[in-house]
Image (tube, rainbow, N blue to C red):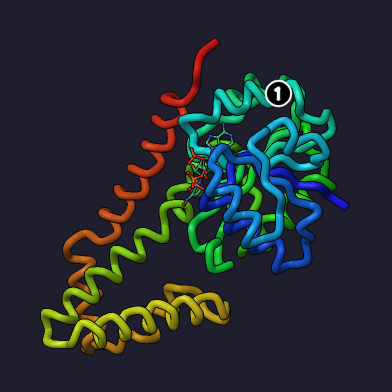
């Protein structure tokens, strides 16, 4: 039985724990540490997991340690934890913009570490997580880490750490792109005379329907788009307007801005020795 410790019991940790418990993990396998008394009580009441304020106690029996604290406190947390980490444990960092080289420096040169980039739809078990492991992680540990993130959606391994920034731009920040599009669709629907309720209901159902059609997988998204775009029809008029105002270029710039920010965060949070 794999024991998993979460350092930090905030939003991300609790939604992953919820998914794990719904997918066959037992509360006895999971330990959590968090400085907040309220956060600890919520974890205990909701999940039946006894949470501690002591990071060292939380990791004592752990096979996998998930670092789920904010990037700003990661250096202090990791450096402090290094002395009590079980030698065989795999450490998984879900912090945006914290690089393996820094984690390695804080935790120890031969520590097995995975960088994971989950996203907020994990809260409804529809998350998408990118994973990259250093060379000290065994294939058995990879499978164990996958199981954690697959409990709240899907996970994909990437071939280089730099690709975690690409994952951040696609799926980490991606939910907000869709929310923004939905916000605008709702607003314009209202401007066109729909009630707020109707504009919202139609927008949400349309997003859900489009995502389900795309995930059914029989056609790729370009084919699906062409299928609903009859020549000379209303959808074609809308799509041609998107293209005329540089939709693809705007999207590309936005996603590259997310990558640039991930890289500057890495520099910001890397505490030099
Ligand atoms: N939310 C997302 O969409 C998302 C997506 C991908 C990755 N991430 C990453 O996930 C990580 C956690 O994000 P979150 O949204 O879950 O943040 P969060 O809700 O603030 O959770 C972090 C928790 O860690 C606790 N903490 C602070 N110092 C600690 C310490 N020394 N030891 C143990 N716990 C400590 C915090 O307690 P206090 O509040 O009392 O300080 C808080 O309860 C971040 O690194 C973020 O980059 C988040």
- The residue that label 1 is drawn on is 82
**Mark 1, residues whose alpha carbon is within 10 Å: few (<14), some, or many (≥20)?**
some
Residue at horizontal 50%, vertical 74%?
Answer: 220
- 19 with respect to 268 (left or right): right
Q: Position of residue 187 (x, y in %)?
A: 18, 74
Q: Is residue 273 above or below residue 65?
A: above
- 211 with respect to 192 (left or right): right
Residue 238: quadrant of the picture:
bottom left
Q: Residue furthest top?
A: 273
Q: Residue furthest right?
A: 1
- Please state which of residues 4 and 136 is positioned toward the viewer in this rendering: 4
The mark total stands at 1
Provide the secondary structure element on which disc 1 rests.
helix
Residue at horizontal 43%, vertical 49%?
Answer: 169
Q: Position of residue 131 (x, y in %)?
A: 63, 47
- In the rendered view of the protein, which quadrant contains the C terminus? top right
Residue 133: quadrant of the picture:
top right
Q: Is residue 154 above or below residue 88?
A: below
- 192 with respect to 252 (left or right): left
Q: Position of residue 129 (x, y in %)?
A: 58, 54
Does mark 1's beta carbon lie closer than 8 Å to ligand 1? no
Q: Position of residue 20 (x, y in %)?
A: 70, 61
Q: Is residue 78 above or below residue 1?
A: above
Q: Is residue 81 above or below residue 255?
A: above
Residue at horizontal 57%, vertical 80%?
Answer: 216
Residue 108: quadrant of the picture:
top right
Residue at horizontal 74%, vertical 21%?
Answer: 83
């Amino acid at each position: 039985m794999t024991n998993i410790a979460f350092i930090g019991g905030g939003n991300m940790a609790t939604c992953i724990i919820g998914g794990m418990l719904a997918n066959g993990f037992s509360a006895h396998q999971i330990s959590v540490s968090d400085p907040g008394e309220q956060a600890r009580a919520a974890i205990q009441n909701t999940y039946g997991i006894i949470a501690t304020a002591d990071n060292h106690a939380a990791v004592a029996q752990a096979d996998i340690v998930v670092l789920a604290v904010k990037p700003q406190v990661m250096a202090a947390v990791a450096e402090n934890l290094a002395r009590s980490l079980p030698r065989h444990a795999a450490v998984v960092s879900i912090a945006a913009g914290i690089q393996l080289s820094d984690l390695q420096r804080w935790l120890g040169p031969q520590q097995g570490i995975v960088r994971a980039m989950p996203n907020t739809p994990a809260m409804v078990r529809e998350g998408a997580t990118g994973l990259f492991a250093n060379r000290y992680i065994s294939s058995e540990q990879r499978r164990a880490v996958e199981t954690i993130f697959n409990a709240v959606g899907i996970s994909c391994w990437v071939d280089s750490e730099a690709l975690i920034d690409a994952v951040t731009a696609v799926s980490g920040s991606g939910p907000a792109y869709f929310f923004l599009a939905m916000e605008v669709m709702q607003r314009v629907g209202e401007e066109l005379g729909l009630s707020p309720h109707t504009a919202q209901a139609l927008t949400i159902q349309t997003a859900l329907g489009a995502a389900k059609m795309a995930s059914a997988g029989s056609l790729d998204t370009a084919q699906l788009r062409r299928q609903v775009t009859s020549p000379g029809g209303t959808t074609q008029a809308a799509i041609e307007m998107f293209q005329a105002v540089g939709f693809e270029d705007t999207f590309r710039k936005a996603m590259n801005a997310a990558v640039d920010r991930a890289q500057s965060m890495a520099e910001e949070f890397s505490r030099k020795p």
